[in-house]
Amino acid sequence: MREICLTGKVFSGSGEGARFIELSWVKEQISEKLGFIPYLGTLNIRLAESGIYNKGLLRKAKSVDICPTEDFCQGKCFEAYFMGKLKCAIIFPEVADYPEDVIEIIASANLREKFRLKDGDLVNVTIKL
């Protein structure tokens, strides 16, 4: 099994991820397709240079798709492990202007609280392909 590791720093986002995750159809699909009920929010990570390259490798990898209803964009997810300990997923909104150096992580728990994270903390997430 191949793995891709992404490393970066935690930063505060605009709250868009939380608004997306709280939609009932999104929660249902994440629960069905990824096997956990997501905490209502995402952890935003600004990737290091090597992480941007590794994120690019995911473009060709098989993803779990979150298919929209109404006027929302599709999201691509990859099952992963946060800090080698907690099952999570990386979610990429499929929007044209989404930053190359950013990932959003969803999990069953509030990752900031569980791992006592603050903006600027260095973290990693491992995607198993």
Image: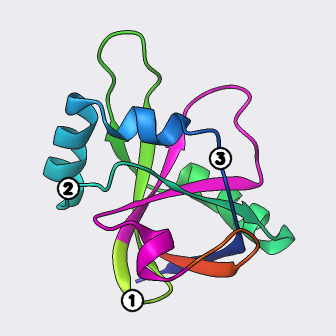
Name the spot of residue 19 as percent of width and height, x first. 43, 33
Q: Which residue is mark 3?
A: 13
- Secondary structure state at the residue bearing disc 3: loop
- Residue at 19%, 61% (x, y): give it: 36
What is the quadrant of the N terminus in the image? bottom left
* 3D distance between C-alphas at marks 2 and 3: 21 Å
Magenta residue span: 88-116
Decide which of tag 2 and tag 3 comes sooner along the chain.
3
- Secondary structure state at the residue bearing disc 1: loop
Q: Which residue is mark 2?
A: 37
Q: Which residue is mark 1?
A: 85
In magenta stretch: residue 65: no
- In this orientation, which residue lies closer to the viewer: 47 or 116? 116
- In this orientation, which residue lies closer to the viewer: 60 or 70? 70
Name the spot of residue 95 as percent of width and height, x first. 61, 27
- In this orientation, which residue lies closer to the viewer: 3 or 105? 105
**Residue type for callout 1:** Lys
- Residue at 25%, 48% (x, y): give it: 30
Is residue 99 visible in the rendered image? The answer is yes
- Residue at 45%, 89% (x, y): give it: 84
**Residue type for callout 2:** Ile
57 vs 33, left or right, is right
Crowd around label 3: few <14 · some 14–19 · many ≥20 (10 Å): some
